[in-house]
Image (cartoon, helix red, strand yellow):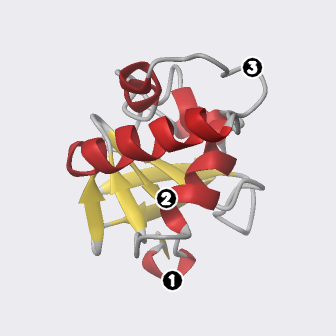
Amino acid sequence: MYYRYSNSENPMSEWGHAMFVDNEFSSENYGSILYIYDGTDAIDIKDLHDIMVDEWNKTIEKGMEPIGFEGIDPEDIFNEFDPEDIVMSAGAWDSELVTWFGDVILANYDIKAVITNDGAIVFDPSLIKRA
């Protein structure tokens, strides 16, 4: 089970995703409303490794890297999408790289949610329940 505390009636962020953590109490300071996600229809970030590295290489070839991420190695970009502690630093999920992920990965692959090291990123709000 994954948990997201918020003060918003809408669990989704302005980026079009909702970030969850696998420890119910590690994000409780973010609000009084608890949303839960059970892992349905998710893909493990590690299973996206080759796709993301390949797509980032194509992005570099086209010179289309998001501003501030020019010249970054594909492995480093991939690692930004699997932060060690998603509550302390959401990595790519809290940066312009989310736009790249949406435009390149979500637009071309049927992904509704991604499981990270210690959390989940959900793109389909129908998968989220209010506790």
The reply, left or right, for residue 44 in relation to residue 26 is left
Residue at image position (65%, 51%) is 6
Residue at image position (66%, 63%) is 12
Of residues 15 and 68, the one drawn nearer to the viewer in this rendering: 68
- Give the mark, 1 or 3, whose residue is nearer the N terminus: 3
- Give the mark, 2 or 3, whose residue is nearer the N terminus: 3
- From this viewpoint, is residue 38 visible? yes
- Check disc 1 and report the residue beneath it: 126
Disc 1 residue type (three-letter): Ser
Disc 1 versus disc 3: nearer the observer = 3
- From this viewpoint, is residue 17 visible? no
Q: Which mark is drawn over residue 63?
A: none
The reply, left or right, for residue 80 in relation to residue 15 is left
Disc 2 residue type (three-letter): Ile
- Check disc 2 and report the residue beneath it: 105
- Check disc 3 and report the residue beneath it: 68
Of residues 15 and 101, the one drawn nearer to the viewer in this rendering: 101
- Give the mark, 2 or 1, whose residue is nearer the N terminus: 2
What x and y, as percent, mark residue 65?
Answer: 67, 33
Count the numbered circles shown: 3
Relative to 16, is 25 above or below?
Answer: above
Q: CA distance from mark 2 to mark 1?
A: 20 Å
**Can you say which quadrant of the picture contains the N terminus?**
bottom left
Q: CA distance from mark 2 to mark 3?
A: 19 Å
> Considering the numbered disc 3 on the image, is that residue within a helix, a strand or a loop?
loop
> Considering the numbered disc 1 on the image, is that residue within a helix, a strand or a loop?
helix
What x and y, as percent, mark residue 127?
Answer: 43, 77
Disc 3 residue type (three-letter): Gly
Question: Callout 2: few (<14), some (14-19), or many (20+) C-alpha neighbours within 10 Å?
Answer: some
What x and y, as percent, mark residue 53?
Answer: 37, 38
